[in-house]
Image (cartoon, grey):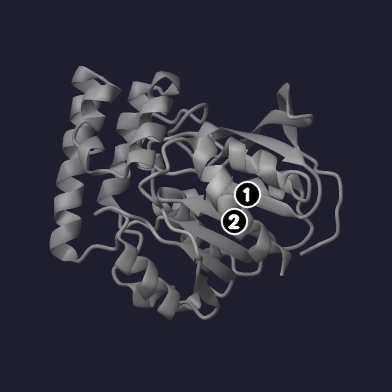
Amino acid sequence: MSAPRPVRPASHSSASDYVHGVLSREFTYHGSDGWPLRANVLGSGPTLILLHGGGPDHHSLMPLAYRLASQYTVVVPDIRGYGRSVCPDPARHTWAQYADDVHSLIETVGAPDEVGLIGTGMGATISLRAGLAYPDRIRRAVLISIEDIEDDKGKAAETELMERFAEKVRTEGIEAGWQLFLPALQPLIANLVSDAIPRSDPASVAAAAAIGRDRAFRTPAELTGFTAQTLIIAGDDKRHPAALAQRVTEVLPDARLAPVTMAPHLRTAQDMAEYFAPAIKEFLAE
């Protein structure tokens, strides 16, 4: 990865916070469709972009970001539809648009060479789509708790469930909508989702559920064009199956499984950062 350099967030830097002696700056960037989105940047060095899962927001990855900021420029966006990146237009929520948002973010921070992506759940799916769409910009990836790649029947069921979720959010609120999913999720993911609900916009969350109508991949075989060096941290529930992590590791040209997994004892963003950071640092340093 490239030598250390100052980051250049392009527009509307609006807030700064020091945590553990590290300055985190908030800024606005724009997707390829011109939609305003929000992100934080901290640290210095080669660029890493951290992409949260569907439901949580950027707060879920800030403890990990602070652990990486001594060696890397770490950029942590709120994915379109979540947290501060409010986007209540369902038509603007597609996998292709999410991948383009990553490219727009890379251009905004002015990364001169390839970047690394770290994605959890939905963020892992976006990382894969971005790496396939922009292979010359993505050098390394850490995929945590990869989302299931359903067959046609499974995808139809997911689409129907996401439509029910969106309707519940619109009529009863975000917390009511998430009750369709939370009981089946790994405890850490459920806690991160619950933590983000007070910071979420109901219309935006309902609109983001339109991603259920789109399809990221039909089979793992479609991932053979993802050439970035990849570390995979297996999931631990039905929506993030451990068996899929093994399958994706076999399909990707340059991937390996991490010695850690989404373990049941993990409960908070802090737990996740402490548990995963050593393996991630070792992988990035190679």
Image-quadrant location for residue 43: top right
> Is the residue 213 above or below the residue 225 in the image?
above
Dot 1 amino acid type: Ile
> Is the residue 72 above or below the residue 138 in the image?
above
| Image position, residue 136 (x, y; %) | 65, 69
> Within 10 Å of the Cα at label 2, are there few (<14), some (14-19), or many (20+) other Cα atoms?
many
| Res. 116 visible in picture | yes
Q: Which residue is mark 2?
A: 117
Dot 2 amino acid type: Leu
The quarter of the rendered structure image containing the C terminus is bottom right
Q: Are marks 2 and 1 in contact (CB under 8 Å)?
A: yes
Which of these two is toward me, 108 or 17?
A: 17
Task: Identify the residue at horizontal 30%, vertical 39% (top origin).
Answer: 209
Which of these two is toward me, 159 or 117?
A: 117
| Image position, residue 23 (x, y; %) | 77, 30
Which of these two is toward me, 31 or 24?
A: 24
Image side of residue 186 versus residue 60, left or right: left
Question: Which of the two labelled residues, at mark 2 and mark 1, occupies the earlier sequence position?
Answer: 1
Which of these two is toward me, 270 or 215?
A: 270
Task: Identify the residue at horizontal 22%, vertical 43% (top origin).
Answer: 184
Q: Which residue is mark 1?
A: 49
Task: Identify the residue at horizontal 38%, vertical 36% (top origin).
Answer: 55
- In the drawing, what numbered circle is on residue 16? none
> Within 10 Å of the Cα at label 1, are there few (<14), some (14-19), or many (20+) other Cα atoms?
many
